[in-house]
Amino acid sequence: MSSPKIQYPDLKPELTTTADMTEKPKTALVVDHCTKYFPQARGAGHSEVGVDEKGFCVFRDVSLEVREGEFLTMIGHSGCGKST
């Protein structure tokens, strides 16, 4: 599996005119094929869902693009790894 690629393109504030509103907004964040594991203690059962030889898989092969003016919201139960 390749390394995750996270890019933060250089964004500079600009004035927007009516003519500019038909253009596609600039990309603010790109995440490409990102996977995150937490190490699993030795002797822990590998029968658990999401656990393999690399540890506990929090998310696998996530790709997304957020453009200027868009919001990204992550929701989940308390302690599920949202801030990871």
Image (cartoon, helix red, strand yellow):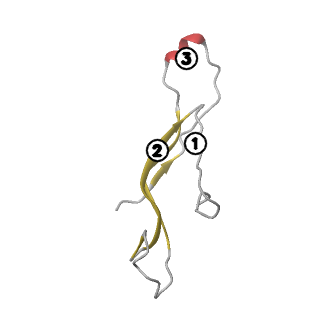
Could you tell me which residue is drawn at 62 percent across and 18 percent down? 16
Q: Which residue is mark 1?
A: 72
Could you tell me the amino acid type at mark 1? Leu
Q: Amino acid at mark 2?
A: Leu
On the image, numbered disc 3 is attached to which residue? 21
State the SS at label 3.
helix
Q: Relative to 54, is 25 on the left or the right?
A: right
Q: Residue at x 62, y 32 (%)?
A: 12
Residue 74 in the image: x percent, y percent? 58, 49
Q: Mark 2 against mark 3, which lies toward the viewer?
A: 2
Residue 70: image x %, image y %?
58, 34
Residue type marked 3 = Met
Q: CA distance from mark 3 to mark 1?
A: 21 Å
* Image location of residue 22, percent across then percent down: 50, 16
Which image quarter is the N terminus in?
bottom left
Q: Earlier in the sequence, mark 2 or mark 3?
A: 3
The reply to whether dot 1 and dot 2 touch (C-beta < 8 Å) is: yes
Q: Residues within 10 Å of mark 2 (few under 14, many from 20)?
A: few
Read off the residue under disc 2: 64
Q: CA distance from mark 1 to mark 2?
A: 10 Å
Q: Image quadrant for the C terminus?
A: bottom right
Q: Earlier in the sequence, mark 1 or mark 2?
A: 2
Q: Residue furthest bottom?
A: 43
